[in-house]
Amino acid sequence: MDGSDRAQFDTVIRGATVFDGLGGAPMQTDVAVHEGRIAAVGGDVGRGREEVDAHGQWLMPGLLDIHTHFDLEVELAPGLPEALRHGSTTVVMSNCSLGLAFGNQRRGDADPVVDCFARVENVPKHVLRKVADAADWQDSGAYLDHFDRMPLGPNVAAMIPHSMLRIEVMGLQDSVSRDPTPDELARMESLLEKGMREGYVGFSTDALPFHYLANQPNVRKQIPTQFAPFGELKRLTHVVRRWGRVWQATPPKDSKVGILRNFLLTSGRLFGRPLKVTAVAAIDLVMNRSIMRMGLVLSRLLNSRFIGGHFRFQALPARFKTWSDGVITPIAEEIPELRRLNECDLEDREGRLRILNDPEYVKAFRRMWYHGRRGFGPARIKHWLKIDDNVLSRDLGDMTIDDCPVEVWHGETMKAVRDRLVAWQRSGEGVRSEAEAEAFASFLDAPDDAEFLLHLLRRYDTALRWWIISANRDMAVVEDLLFNPLLLPGFNDSGAHLTNMAFYDGNLRMLKIAQKRGLARVALAVRRLTSEPAEFFGVDAGTLAVGARADLLLVDPERLAVWEPEATYRYVWREAFDHHQLVNRSEGVVRRVYVNGHCAFADGDFGADFERVPMGQVLRSRDHDPAAANAPAMARAA
């Protein structure tokens, strides 16, 4: 530009409506960035080598994505493009007890990264093997250090994952077979203490009973964290409490006593100091709306003066829309009859077909499918009252075909296809293509919906791709959850379930929800997506002020207003994975993204330096003392 020799700053963004991330009223002003930091806000800020005209646009701190499994993708594609394109400049990894803090942990025949992630997070094994091959460190400190050598896109913050901690101390097989010895428990405590000294932002566990291992001989065993007795959990979370870090957890959903006992660990009244806890998740389940109501009551109780806790359920800013490849889907693991099919490897079609053709399995499947939907008894009453035990609705009218060899079925519910089949069988009329006629001819006469689905699974296996919305159908309820001060928005699960769900745009969805109620509501939404989670996790992020790191997001409010998130799912090929991935595309909504002052994304494309130079960095806890990182294990307690 003319006069660039007189430029005071690297970048000046002019005329944007600026949100500070703290909830203050937005103001139209200029913002200058220099050497990775915000150098000036408002007034005559001077010139920049890069001048950005942002009139009519919103400028805010980069957003935080607090529930991700990007630990996997960051080793193969460190730019994390699906986070950046939606304005997430800081991501929290190692949720649900899974992560790479201790490397690949391969010992003997054990392959823990593959075994633990494949079914819990629905990531194909060949992708996980690539990740494990790249994980050449063996120590939690070396794990954080290796990010300094990577061309990161967003900033990353990691937790110590409990399943991997147990494997590190006990070995994979023993971690799912017995309790730890006193020496092993002391070793776990020591390694967790070490991680806190190194700056990990927290500790993650998991108690959802349908999270299973993926390799023989353990396909009917849950992941290691599930085998931890309460005493182990109490002892390890005490370490986290002393350091003022975060415990990320999921509830033991089938035990109300277990849920209360576990989450009472947040209590400052009982334990002398509150433990920061964030848990999955505050969502409005279609089949059991009482769970959300009970969760809100529990949250109020745990945060009350009587308990003195610091507890936050996580809320999802979207309809809980999940895709299934045949029966491969996260919600299938909850149901034993469907879980049995998931015990087969993704490529093992023959194994699934043998099960589907087994008469005894067919009987069991039919009992499951109609449980509570026929006859009379407690299960039928629970179904009537919408307090079912499972997430899957078992209603063909809720199940929409997205892709399969019969093209005329695309976009139709399974109920519509079955109804047309039965009508064709009666009249011989109404078939819409040769492929449909061939498919209809393969069915038994007048199949009920259970047999109809079984036949589809036998015939098409994973070539049948369908979706269902099993929670958050009512967006008014979703809005209430997102703005509830006792919850945290951000149960996006980014980086997991590669083909089954995509909420990378979850933070933008919340901005869109807020936009309908005016700029004051947007300012609140920005605060809840930036400084609030940054404060909760104790990281240096989330504010737009002089001296803050220049992680910035520029949003076009006009494009945000007309954007239809439900219409912008895409199924794309990712070279880094050698596999397809379900993603979101919010074209035009995000105009620019800066990380540490680097322009990472602008006008629909990534910057020239993307994945060539480091932009993001590993974020250690704000109170991390590098000088104390190698101090004796109990120095902090003293």
Image (cartoon, rainbow, N blue to C red):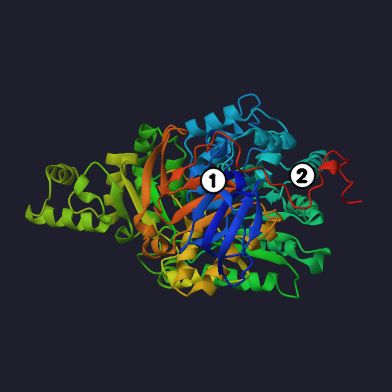
Q: Decide: few, some or many residues near mark 1? Use Cα within 10 Å; few <14, some 14-19, many ≥20.
A: some
Residue 74 at what x, y percent from top left? 56, 38
Outermost residue to the top: 108
Q: CA distance from mark 2 to mark 1?
A: 36 Å
Q: Earlier in the sequence, mark 2 or mark 1?
A: 2
Q: Residue furthest left?
A: 428
Q: Residues within 10 Å of mark 2 (few under 14, many from 20)?
A: many
Check disc 1 and give the amino acid type. Cys
Q: Nearer the viewer, residue 129 or 458?
A: 129
The residue pinned by badge 2 equals: 192
When the figure is inspected, residue 49 is found, relative to residue 430, above or below; the finding is: above
| Residue at the far right in the pictured view | 638
Image spot of residue 259 (x, y percent): 65, 62
Q: What SS does tag 1 mark? A: strand
Q: Quadrant of residue 282?
A: bottom right
Task: State the residue at coordinates (55%, 58%).
Answer: 490
Residue at screen point 59% across, 58% down: 31
**Quadrant in which residue 472 is drawn:** bottom left
In-front residue for pair 70/337: 70
State the residue at coordinates (25%, 55%): 412
Q: Is residue 303 left or right of residue 568?
A: right
Residue 526 vs residue 17, the one in the foreground: 17
Q: Position of residue 353 (x, y in %)?
A: 34, 37
Does residue 504 appear left or right of residue 353 in this picture?
A: right
Residue of label 1: 599
Residue type, numbered disc 2: Leu
Residue 495 showing in the rendered view: no
Q: Depth-wise, is mark 2 or mark 1 nearer the camera?
A: 1
Q: Position of residue 506 (x, y in %)?
A: 49, 57
